[in-house]
Amino acid sequence: MTLSALLLVMTLGQSPAADADVEAGAPETAESAAAAPADEAPAQPDDAPTEATPAPAVEAAPANPATPAMQPWLETRRVDGWSTNFGVDGLELRLNAALRLSQSVSSPVVLDETGTTTRLTPFETRLRLAPELRYRFLSLVSEFDVLTGAALGIPDASVVAGRVPTPAWHAADLRQLYFQYRWRSGLFRGGLQTSHFGLGMLANAGAQDAQSGDFGMQHRGTIALRALFAGRPFLGVNEWLSLLEPFAAFDLVVRDGTADLQEGDRALHGIVGLRFNFDERNVLALTLIYRNQRRPGGTPDERSTDAYVLDVSGKWTLWQQGSSWLDVGAEVAAITGTTTQGRADVAPVLDVRQLGAVAKVTYASKRFGLLFDAGYASGDQNPYDTQLNNFRFDRDYKVGLVLFDQVLGYQSARTAWRAGDPQLSGYPPEGLDLLPTAGALTGAWYLFPRARLTVTEGLDVYGGPLFAFASATPVDVFNTRLNGGEVLNSLGARGGRYYGTELDLGVNLKLMLARFFKLTATLEGGVLFPGDAFRQADGSLMAPVGLGRLRFTAQL
């Protein structure tokens, strides 16, 4: 029933494996790409048809992490970062870094029926550093962001609630710090890790901005303190059995869509699953997760959630001939359980029933490519019953530029701000802080066909229309409550189920300035032509909204 429900699942589907940060150029050797049971993996080339796919969890003979050709104390620079062995056989220190700068500009966005508007002009910075120390089969991996977020250009707390699509600027953010030990048929990994499962719909590491053909920019990432065991117990027994990778993990969530350890939430995960890992582009996975969330020191049922998640995902190359191929990928997640984190105060405990799914198809032939995405998130038009049905994608799974990532993200943040005013709404419900979507897709389904053309090596042009529909009549809990339960949208009218058509266009340029240094410039823009879901109180439709963004990334 309520969109806060989906949040409880965002982390449930986290894969036990930490992802490789492609932006920071994290090295994807046999060791670093290893054994994660989830579908996280090293990124493929920029023209790869589907999202990055995981490398095999275990290799028959793990490579020695040292670089044999490296002379004692000789510093070596490579595409995947700077590294040295300090003259010690079997030792390697590697540093990967990526600097990202971006400027976005939007036309005015209407936030509510009173005519409150905002114009988004965020200037964002981020320096991502990923030092890694290896000695034979032991690794110590870290990753952190500094000077990250929007330095200016986003609405302040007098207009919207805190969970907004573009986070405010802050000094530092530790993303990973974990220890790993590998043996011939498995690994153990323990410590702070990012999480990414399947295509990233359910849980997303926030490790890689959109590549040519896709749109959007990632900001946060799901993070957990995790103990993980994974491996290939049938390695060498049979060709097909050797590809099976069972895994098990236990998490203490540091942050995800529903919990924040620093805010006093304690969310625990038990995760088990099985992955069939044929190769980097052909993977199937089944994962089961149990989530238990409480707030220590609070009342017995404060911010309480007990939920079970089933997630099935896969990606496969259906056909390949020369420089042409056809790839498909899909992820489906179902959630059931109970929670007290509702957006209304009608029932103390709510039943969770949610379903989400995405599919991706990519055809590429030499310089030309066709991409097609579709997705579904169950919706909920009644905030006053005893169920939570709104499935919510991970906020770093991007669909288009304008509608979900900006317009609905800021309209929902405005609704939460108004609903939290005690002079207007009395005592706010427990799950009110989860009401803003932070740019995530929820309660909607969409079709997103696109085309991509490689003009010359390193230069791509791409774009297409996004058709978006509500899976249930859009409801603004604040306006609906003020009008005695009549379902109204954020603009004070009863809207339809067509969110509208968004036209997106992008240009991506990649330059290798040296063997070890890559510069990427991305210019992307979109215009949303609203449908009847954005009907205003006078019967007219909300004005079109446009957004443009220029992004530079320098990668070591």
Image (cartoon, rainbow, N blue to C red):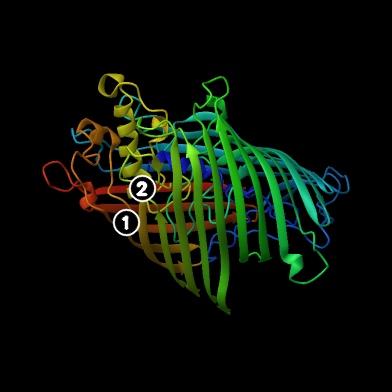
Distance of label 1 from label 2 (alpha carbons):
9 Å
Rendering coords of residue 167 (x, y %): 44, 34
Q: Circle 2: is it few (<14), some (14-19), or many (20+) Cα within 10 Å?
A: many
Q: Residue at x 27, y 19 (%)?
A: 423
Rendering coords of residue 116 (x, y %): 22, 33
Residue 81 or 165: which is nearer the viewer? 165
| Residue ID for mark 2 | 404
- Seen in the picture, residue 62 relative to 407 is either above or below; the reply is below
Q: Residue at x 57, y 72 (%)?
A: 317
Name the residue type under label 1.
Answer: Ala
Tell me the quarter of the image containing the N terminus.
Answer: top left
- Which structural element holds mark 1? strand
Q: Circle 1: is it few (<14), some (14-19), or many (20+) Cα within 10 Å?
A: many
| Residue ID for mark 1 | 468
Rendering coords of residue 223 (x, y %): 59, 39
Observer able to see residue 120? no
Kindly identify which numbered label has been placed on residue 44: none
Residue 429 or 401: which is nearer the viewer? 429
Residue 101 or 326: which is nearer the viewer? 326
Whether residues under marks 1 and 2 lie with C-beta atoms below 8 angstroms apart, the answer is: yes
Rendering coords of residue 375 (x, y %): 41, 58
